[in-house]
């Protein structure tokens, strides 16, 4: 017999925001959408669904999407990287204050581990247990949160210690990290500055490139580094099923925004959406469009560490793809669509949802979905997990 308390877990609550605009050009300039995309700096998965497309169209789009992300870039998985390495002066000058760096704990969970993140803005974020924080003896002025875990924030971009006090503060944290030997598996991606010289004609070890970080960590610091792809593409065709259309107005017998988002999520998760005669089958009423002999439904999944700028580039490419197809004959009733879903890393100390337990864990649900209709209109749905203990009215505002 199951313990009666098993079904009494509180439902994880969340904050959801839906934004619509007539076109992606207008949506991209919207402060709300641009701010939300750029605030999510650690994106682990981007899923793109392309209904009713010919293979030749998808092949061309695939090439354009790959060109949007930086070709040849990769991540460094640093085994048991001492956190003091992130605060060394040569590392700060070469990789934090030049180019854009993304670093995050490779396997840690917020509720059980001490987690680390280093943002492209040069902000070092630590999610520490009480025991770790007390052992380090850090200043209370660095703490931004005290709900079971301590979130420590340190700005590594400040270079004027005489006026800001950043120098002594970084030095103090560096000393404590070295004394306590804090380390974790760290996943790091570094994008070199675009204005730096490639130093043609010199030996490869002197050329500034994404490999410069790996050479520094392995040769200069003697750390164990595993090279992993920063971006990994996978493409597959989906079930050859009729695709629901989005309503143009309330009188259309098509799916609503919420129904389309649910259907889109099921495609991304590879759920069975084909209707069968079972009580638990998934059904979605309304007008649909059938694939013909030349078209299929496609799913492109991009895994790795995708930067916010690359996500914007992917949406730009999709919007251009939709614009080129607008001249084709539209459905008689309803709007065909393409969609992009972005899933962020769940163990970022800066996540909006790190305000408490999410029912059984602290890792945060942080994602958003952008759907572009064949009429050019854009639907953006932002989802952020909050506290599983029950969100207050103020938390949801």
Image (cartoon, rainbow, N blue to C red):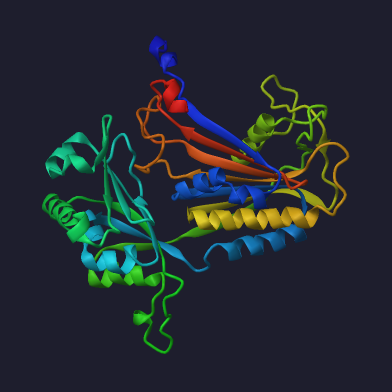
Q: Residue at x 85, y 47 (%)?
A: 292
Q: How many marks?
A: 0
Relative to 26, is 228 on the left or the right? Answer: left
**Which quadrant would the N terminus be assigned to in this image?**
top left
Q: Is residue 310 visible?
A: yes
Residue 54 in percent (x, y) is at 78, 55
- Classify 94 as above or below 4: below
Q: Quadrant of residue 209?
A: bottom left
Is residue 40 in view? no
Query: Residue 271, located in which quarter of the rendered image?
Result: top right
Residue 39 placement, left or right of 59: left
Residue 240, image quadrant: top right
- Along the horizontal axis of the image, is 290 left or right of 12? right
> Looking at this rendering, what residue extends furthest in the front direction?
163
Q: Residue at x 33, y 66 (%)?
A: 95
For this orientation, the residue located farthest to the bottom is: 201
Q: Nearer the viewer, residue 167 or 198?
A: 167
Residue at 23% across, 54% down: 83
Residue 295 locus on image (x, y percent): 80, 51
Q: Position of residue 203 (x, y in %)?
A: 36, 86
Residue placed most toward the observer, 358 or 156: 156
């Amino acid at each position: 017999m199951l313990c009666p308390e098993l079904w009494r877990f509180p439902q994880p609550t969340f904050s959801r925001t839906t934004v619509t605009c007539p076109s992606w050009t207008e949506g991209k300039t919207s402060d709300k959408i641009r701010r939300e995309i750029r605030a999510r700096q650690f994106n682990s998965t981007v899923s793109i669904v392309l209904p009713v497309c010919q293979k030749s169209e998808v092949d061309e789009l695939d090439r354009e999407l790959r060109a949007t992300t930086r070709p040849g870039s990769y991540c460094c998985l640093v085994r048991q990287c001492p956190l003091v390495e992130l605060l060394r002066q040569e590392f700060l000058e070469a990789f934090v204050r030049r180019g854009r760096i993304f670093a995050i704990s490779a396997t840690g969970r917020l509720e059980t581990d001490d987690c680390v993140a280093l943002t492209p803005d040069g902000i070092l974020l630590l999610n520490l247990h009480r025991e770790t924080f007390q052992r380090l003896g850090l200043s209370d002025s660095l703490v931004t949160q005290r709900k079971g875990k301590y979130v420590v924030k340190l700005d590594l971009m400040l270079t004027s210690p005489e006026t800001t006090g950043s120098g002594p503060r970084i030095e103090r944290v560096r000393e404590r990290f070295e004394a306590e030997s804090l380390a974790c598996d760290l996943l790091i991606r570094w994008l070199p500055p675009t204005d730096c010289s490639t130093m043609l004609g010199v030996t490869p070890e002197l050329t500034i490139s994404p490999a410069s970080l790996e050479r520094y960590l392995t040769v200069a610091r003697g750390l164990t580094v595993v090279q992993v792809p920063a971006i990994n593409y996978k493409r597959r065709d989906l079930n050859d099923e009729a695709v629901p259309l989005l309503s143009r107005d309330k009188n259309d017998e098509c799916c609503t925004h919420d129904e389309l988002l649910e259907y889109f999520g099921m495609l991304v998760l590879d759920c069975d959406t084909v209707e069968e005669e079972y009580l638990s089958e998934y059904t979605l009423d309304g007008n649909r469009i059938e694939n013909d002999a030349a078209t299929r439904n496609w799913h492109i999944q991009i895994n790795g560490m995708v930067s916010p700028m690359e996500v914007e580039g992917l949406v730009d490419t999709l919007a251009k793809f939709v614009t080129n197809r607008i001249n084709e004959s539209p459905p008689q009733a309803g709007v065909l669509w393409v969609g992009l879903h972005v899933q962020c890393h769940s163990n970022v100390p800066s996540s909006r949802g790190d305000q408490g337990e999410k029912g059984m864990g602290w890792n945060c649900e942080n994602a958003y979905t952008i759907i572009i209709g064949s009429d050019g209109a854009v639907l953006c749905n932002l989802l952020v997990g909050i506290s599983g203990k029950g969100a207050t009215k103020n938390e949801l505002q």
